[in-house]
Image (tube, grey):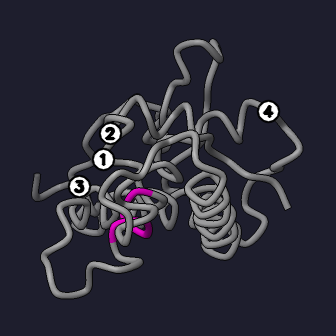
């Protein structure tokens, strides 16, 4: 089982102190370099990657680095949501919206509505919306289009 995101990717979305506190909320002085914090984050990354595998159900060849790079942002969002939820059940999760979007995106990839693509790993193109005409992030006017109400 592969991890589809990294601690470095998470640190691009959340500052180090907040990420450490989300991982170890029992220690107000948690540091991103603490072994406990690293172990917790790595486990949550593995759990989020496993969740992505379950949703995708083999729709992508995950041995292809381009595919793993293209779903990385979604897996990072799922990881942040899961980290916050570990010990924060009484508070509203600020990552809920990005989590929902990530799950929807992965489900569309699994159904073939979206195609994971990237031509430049440094830029990590996210997901390409596909129709019969292969438009990028286009809208389809068909009533079954999940994006038609946007």
Q: Nearer the viewer, residue 117 or 33?
A: 33
- Which structural element holds mark 1? helix
- Which structural element holds mark 2? loop
The tag earlier along the polypeptide, 3 or 1, is 1
- Snapshot quadrant of residue 23: bottom left
Q: Nearer the viewer, residue 16 or 12?
A: 16
Q: Nearer the viewer, mark 2 or mark 1?
A: 1
Secondary structure that dominates the magenta span: helix
Q: CA distance from mark 2 to mark 3?
A: 28 Å
Report whether 3 appears left or right of 103: right
Report whether 89 appears left or right of 51: left
Which label was assigned to residue 18?
1
The tag earlier along the polypeptide, 2 or 4, is 2
> Cβ–Cβ below 8 Å for labels 2 and 3?
no
Give the residue number, with chain letter if any, for mark 2. Answer: 14
Q: Nearer the viewer, mark 3 or mark 1?
A: 1
Q: CA distance from mark 1 to mark 4?
A: 29 Å
The tag earlier along the polypeptide, 3 or 4, is 4
The tag earlier along the polypeptide, 2 or 3, is 2
User: Range of the magenta residues?
Assistant: 80-84
Q: Is the N terminus in the top left, top right, bottom left or bottom right quadrant?
A: bottom right
Residue 40 percent coordinates (x, y): 59, 64
Give the residue number, with chain letter if any, for mark 4. Answer: 65
Residue under the point 33% across and 67% down: 84
Give the residue number, with chain letter if any, for mark 3. Answer: 147
């Amino acid at each position: 089982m592969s991890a589809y995101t990294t601690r470095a990717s998470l640190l691009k979305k959340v500052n180090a102190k907040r990420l450490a506190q989300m991982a170890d909320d029992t220690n107000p002085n948690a540091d991103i370099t603490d072994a406990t914090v690293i172990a917790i984050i790595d486990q949550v990354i593995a759990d989020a990657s496993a969740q992505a595998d379950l949703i995708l159900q083999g729709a992508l060849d995950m041995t292809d680095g381009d595919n793993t790079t293209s779903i990385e942002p979604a897996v990072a969002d799922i990881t942040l949501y899961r980290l916050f939820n570990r010990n924060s059940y009484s508070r509203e999760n600020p990552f809920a919206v990005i989590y929902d979007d990530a799950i929807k995106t992965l489900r569309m990839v699994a159904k073939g509505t979206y195609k994971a693509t990237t031509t430049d790993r440094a830029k990590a193109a996210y997901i390409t919306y596909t129709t019969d005409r292969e438009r990028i992030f286009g809208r389809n006017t068909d009533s079954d289009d999940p994006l038609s109400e946007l």
